[in-house]
Image (spheres, grey):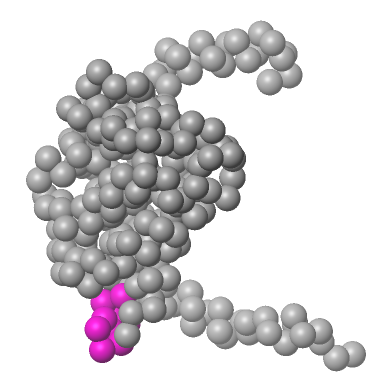
């Protein structure tokens, strides 16, 4: 009996072994990393939760976001510059696919004094406030490549980006402004969308501009950085131990099978 097209395209056992060998011999894994080397590196759980720099230190250590990763991002900042606008445009086109994510843009943005849509039937990508918001997002994308990642101020900025979406002022320009509250799920999904857009943009760079080794290093470093930013969002959205215990108790009281 002849095999199906799916069977014909399936990797052979030898191909799987070669791929596995390639992964295990790469920079991410090695024989010395297979098992933890005692004593374990110590991090204090409460400090990770309560102290920004300690949280960043653990996150960087866990993801192996090294000074070299930061330098890699810095090294392509000028190449990324022309990609910022199309990246931001792509993000907003995605956000405007759904009424759920578009509704967040009906509130007046801090620092914007012009006219803006107050209902979905008036909201368009050409809305003056959307252009203002695109500038802010563009600034964030640039900082993902231009920042000094060894400076605590950089991580303080990324932390404020997260905090400002939970209703806190975070930045001085948001003081005495209406709170900006965005749900965690669309924030996390948006970061995933940004990764997708940037990865494709980097991969499409001409080889004489960035060779395959450079592209791989940039994608790896950017992916780690986005996850670090995502963790800072989680920091502001996550419940404390007491809040989680209370919420769990309420759930169990309402549903004994939970």
At which x and y percent is residue 158? 24, 41
Q: Is residue 206 above or below residue 197?
A: below
Q: Report the magenta residues as a range.
A: 207-215
Q: Nearer the viewer, residue 95 or 72?
A: 95
* Image position of 242 with respect to 85: above or below: above
Magenta-drawn stretch contains 211: yes
Kindly tell me whether residue 36 is visible in this rendering: no
Residue farthest along the right direction in this orientation: 1
Q: Residue at x 34, y 21 (%)?
A: 178
Which quadrant: the C terminus?
A: top right
Name the side, left or right, on which 151 lies relative to 24: left
Residue plotted at (39% across, 67% down): 199
Quadrant housing residue 251 = top right
Which of these two is toward me, 120 or 148? 120
Quadrant of the snapshot with the N terminus? bottom right
85 lies left or right of 185: left
């Amino acid at each position: 009996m002849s095999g199906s097209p799916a069977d014909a395209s399936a990797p052979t056992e030898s191909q799987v072994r070669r791929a596995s060998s390639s992964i295990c011999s790469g920079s991410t894994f090695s024989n010395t990393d297979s098992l933890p080397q005692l004593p374990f590196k110590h991090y204090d759980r409460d400090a990770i939760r309560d102290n920004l720099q300690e949280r960043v230190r653990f996150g960087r250590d866990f993801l192996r976001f090294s000074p070299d990763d930061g330098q890699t991002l810095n090294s392509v900042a000028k190449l990324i510059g022309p990609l910022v606008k199309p990246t931001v445009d792509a993000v907003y086109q995605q956000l405007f696919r759904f009424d759920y994510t578009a509704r967040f843009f009906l509130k007046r943005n801090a620092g914007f004094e012009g006219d803006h849509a107050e209902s979905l039937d008036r909201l368009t990508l050409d809305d003056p406030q959307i252009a203002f918001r695109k500038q802010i997002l563009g600034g964030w994308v640039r900082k993902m490549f231009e920042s000094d990642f060894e400076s605590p101020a950089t991580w303080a900025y990324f932390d404020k980006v997260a905090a400002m979406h939970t209703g806190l002022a975070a930045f001085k320009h948001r003081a005495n402004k209406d709170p900006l509250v965005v749900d965690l799920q669309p924030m996390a999904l948006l970061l995933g969308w940004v990764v997708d857009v940037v990865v494709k943009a980097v991969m499409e760079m001409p080889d004489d501009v960035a060779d395959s080794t450079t592209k791989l290093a940039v994608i790896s470093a950017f992916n780690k950085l986005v996850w670090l930013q995502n963790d800072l969002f989680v920091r502001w959205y996550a419940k404390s131990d007491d809040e989680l215990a209370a919420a769990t108790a309420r759930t169990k009281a309402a549903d004994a099978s939970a």
